[in-house]
Amino acid sequence: MALRDEVRERGGGRCECTMKTCCHHRGRCNAILRGEWQMHRRSAGGPYTYTLGNVIAMCQTCHRNTRTYGRGYWHLELPNTYKASRCQ
């Protein structure tokens, strides 16, 4: 099974975000992962840090709220012009 499939399965097909900077949820997000969802690394360090213990499944809204959105090694599939939108 591919890592992406394992991450999605572990989260029950839902976003695993628990960040306090997201204004659209309290606690865990739990948004259903449809279409384009992201694997977010808890600790950066190059492409070899993509392991089951170091990534979480995130919906696009939550992933855009991370401070490192668009700076990762594998962000080439995402539009580079989209900036993180933080709740105020």
Image (tube, rainbow, N blue to C red):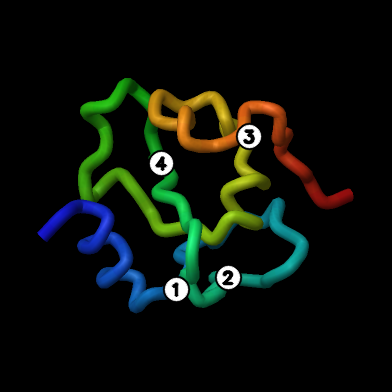
Q: Residue at x 43, y 45 (%)?
A: 40
- Residue 73 higher or lower than 22, as above or below: above
Whole-Å distance between the Cαs marked 2 and 4?
16 Å
* Residue 15 rendering spot, x and y as whole percentages: 48, 67
Task: Say which element carries label 4.
Answer: loop
First-in-chain label (4 vs 1): 1
Q: Nearer the observer, disc 3 or disc 1?
A: 1
Number of the label disc, if any, that sits on residue 42: 4
Task: Compare marks 2 and 4 and give the one earlier in the sequence.
Answer: 2
Q: Amino acid at mark 1?
A: Arg
**Which quadrant of the view contains residue 10?**
bottom left
Residue 53 location, x and y as percent? 24, 49
Callout 3: 10 Å neighbours few (<14), some, many (20+)?
few
Q: Which residue is mark 1?
A: 14
Task: Please give the count of numbered marks on the rendered protein.
Answer: 4
Query: For this rendering, which residue is in front, 23 or 35?
Result: 35
Indicate the position of residue 87 as horizontal and vertical percent values: 82, 51
Front of the two marks 2 and 1: 1
Q: Residue 11: which quarter of the image?
A: bottom left
The residues bearing labels 3 and 2 have C-alpha atoms spaced at a distance of 17 Å
The amino acid type of the residue labelled 2 equals: Cys
Quadrant (top left, top right, bottom left, bottom right) of the N terminus: bottom left
Three-letter code, disc 3: Arg
Residue 28 point in image, percent of width and height: 54, 71
Residue 31 or 87: which is nearer the viewer? Answer: 31
The secondary structure type at the circle numbered 3 is: loop
> Which residue is disc 3 drawn over?
67
Q: Residue at x 45, y 51 (%)?
A: 38
| Sequence-first disc among 3 and 1 | 1
